[in-house]
Image: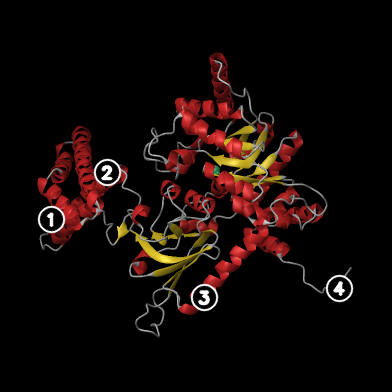
Amino acid sequence: MTRGPEGPPPDDSSRPAEQVFRGIGVSPGIAIGPVVVLDPRGMRLPPRRIAADAVPAEVARLASALAAAAAEGAQAEAEARERLGPQYAEILAAHAAMIGDPQLAADARERIERRRISAEHAVIEVLEGLAGRLEGLSDSHLAARAADVRDIEARIVDQLAGARAPSFQDDLAAPSVVLAHDLTPSDAAQLDPRKVLGFATEAGGRASHTAIVAAALEIPAVAGAGTLLGHARSARLAVVDGESGLIVLDPAPATLDRYRAAAEARTARFRTLSEEAALPAVTLDGVEVGLHANIEFVDEAAACARWGAAGIGLYRTEFLYLRSTAPPTEEEQFAAYAEAVRSLQGRPVVIRTLDLGADKLASHVGGIGAEANPALGLRSLRYSLRRPEVFRTQIRAVLRAAALGDVRILLPMVTTLDELRRARDLIGEVAAALRAEGTPHREAPPLGAMVEVPATALMADRFAKEVDFFSIGTNDLIQYTLAVDRTNEAVADLYSAADPAVLRLIARVVEAAAARGIPCAVCGSMGGELLYTTFLLGLGVRELSMAPHQIPEVRRLIRGVSLEQARAIAAEALTLDTAREVVALLEDALRPAPTGAPAG
Ligand code: PEP
Ligand code: MG
């Protein structure tokens, strides 16, 4: 295998050279298929073609995006005039005039009709042509206008994105491997595993929500691969290996054979594991561990049954928002929660209230503006408390579904006791309203707090007195403890569940829960990683929640360890200084004992 685009020339001149790129494996499995490249704005290159009968709709999209961008430009001009004076306003007035130029509309329209390309590409072609011509001029003042043209281009394309282009998946000719600069969680929520065999992105980190969705949909994925698209445009076939984080473009025949064999072996391994779905997750010395499933979409409930989940440990309900074009109504939410409860047939369903914000934003989610530090901004429970009408609608649906089975409510990103109490009061008010109306509901289902912020872990003894259970969200707990953005590939190497600071916080929370006699689950990605299973068990965690397909391997591991071994490993891990030492210890513990070793 050659490494990157600089490898030696191919031996067969008709076959492109194999190129290998390394990123972060975020959703396991191997995908092999034809390549589709999305450009940084999410459009296919070469331009997305549209069907003949879709031309009028595309022209209409163009017209409304131009009108909206012109209105936005006029407003920006008026604001600039008031705040900054006429000099700045003139620049924006020129922008607005350019957007409103009938020639631009005519040129873009002509491209859509004649060449049947998307409105986005038509606009980009027209304005990139103009920007290129300006840049070529010797007059430096005019050449600088190219930046204005690109600004306008971005405004119009943003409007088109807001007007929601049909998904790129709709016109994939065959199931494909998608390569993109980045995919938002809402892009990922639309992915159809029958059409997208796997994907790789240049950006993105280990615990991004896009990665979580990929794992939920069982789509192999690699994130944070760096500059990939420039090399991929002429590639025909790609392999995405979500385990090792490798992307192979135009694999050589021997490479392809190797990956095909690995994919088959993986399928066979999972077939065997699925036969163990009915076995209990008990240690060698008889301690039972609850293995629950994290779901984002209600249709994953089938996978919970297939892999033998003891319940749903985390239902990320915000994906109801991210998958649709309008906020879901109370009835739509009730239908989804009720279906989850029915599918689980009496087993518990932990419904997490909305965790919107940060990277989980849909265009229709109101009230969250552009933020410099969205992970520290208006997200999650903070958002729900700021928009009580949104929260109440959700809680009404949850309490109604709770009348149908074992529903528990989990509050995300709880940071202070005040927030917890306010949320509890609001839930009480909603229950009182349902009671007054005579609507069937459950009055006060168990209420839990996610522990995802160091402040909450530090105050765990106090929180333990006021909640029915804890669920540790390690994805955010790591991000906030180590000050490492979970979605940023540039610092992905610093993001580690094995950091001693993270381990100590987890130990503290587990201890506080045990002292109070309340359950403490781990539902962040750490909960499904085999490397940490024994450690968590040894700390005293008896409930893990993970992507459904991770359950069988974790079950198998638990059935092969004793609590005594687990306690020794946890105790030793807590004495170590660095994440590297912790990983070395845990990897060593995972290694099978050498066969043929002398007994005794
Ligand atoms: C977490 O932060 O660990 C968690 C489970 O929540 P999410 O990944 O949805 O932020
Ligand atoms: Mg979280």
The residue that mark 1 highlights is: 141
Q: Amino acid at mark 1?
A: His
Q: Pointers 2 and 1 in contact (CB under 8 A)?
A: no
Q: Amino acid at mark 4?
A: Pro
What residue is drawn where x is 27% and y is 59%?
47
What kind of element bears circle 1? helix
The residue that mark 2 highlights is: 159
The residue that mark 3 highlights is: 257
Q: Pointers 4 and 2 in contact (CB under 8 A)?
A: no
Please state the horizontal and vertical placement of residue 95, each as a whole percent of the image.
Answer: 17, 45
Does 554 sit left or right of 245 as displayed?
Answer: right
What residue is drawn where x is 47% and y is 39%?
320
Q: Amino acid at mark 2?
A: Gln
Q: Amino acid at mark 3?
A: Asp
What residue is drawn where x is 35% and y is 50%?
167
Q: From the viewer's side, name the closer residue of 483 and 558.
A: 558
Mark-to-mark CA distance, 4 and 2: 71 Å
Does 457 sit left or right of 226 as displayed?
Answer: right
**Of pointers 4 and 1, the one earlier in the residue sequence:** 1
**Of pointers 4 and 3, the one earlier in the residue sequence:** 3
What kind of element bears circle 4? loop
Please state the horizontal and vertical placement of residue 329, each as a whole percent of the image.
Answer: 44, 30
Q: Pointers 3 and 1 in contact (CB under 8 A)?
A: no
Q: Residue furthest front?
A: 53
